[in-house]
Amino acid sequence: MAARRLIPLLDRVLVKRIEPPTKSVGGILLPESSQSKLNEGIVIACGPGRRDKDGSLLPMGVKVDDKVLLPQYGGSEVAIGDDEMVLFRDEDILGVLKD
């Protein structure tokens, strides 16, 4: 995957948004106008972290393959090949979703 070759710098996280469902639970196809952008994504790559005033490395709050909750707005859109991804700062990610 081409996105695995992009290594974010500092405290940035590369996230691929989860696509909204195109069918309802009953199997009915949903029109695009009724589909909303989901605020969930999968972490594809993480930077090493940010440094504090003393120069020590602050660890990242997420790791690769975590399912995360994203803010409604923000991030930088990145197109890698045919994939659309978003680059967020670690502090912008709202939380990690567990199954």
Image: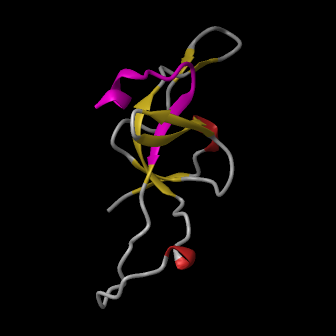
Query: Quadrant of the image for the N terminus?
Result: top left
- As rendered, which of 81 and 55 lies closer to the eye? 81
x 39%, y 71%: residue? 21
Q: Is residue 56 left or right of residue 80?
A: right
Q: Which residue appears farthest toward the right when viewing the image?
A: 53
Compared to residue 11, the image places residue 41 above or below, namely below
x, y (%) of residue 44?
38, 37
x 50%, y 23%: residue? 8
x 57%, y 20%: residue? 10
x 29%, y 87%: residue? 27
x, y (%) of residue 62?
45, 39
Compared to residue 84, the image places residue 12 above or below, namely above
- Tell how many labels: 0
- As rendered, which of 58 and 47 lies closer to the eye? 47
- As rendered, which of 59 and 27 lies closer to the eye? 27
Question: In this picture, which residue range is highlighted in magenta?
Answer: 1-16
Q: Quadrant of residue 37?
A: bottom right
Query: Quadrant of the image for the C terminus?
Result: bottom left
- As rendered, which of 52 and 62 lies closer to the eye? 62
Compared to residue 34, the image places residue 52 above or below, namely above
**Is residue 12 one of those drawn in magenta?**
yes
x, y (%) of residue 3?
37, 30
**Is residue 76 one of those drawn in magenta?**
no
Q: Which residue appears farthest toward the bottom when viewing the image?
A: 26
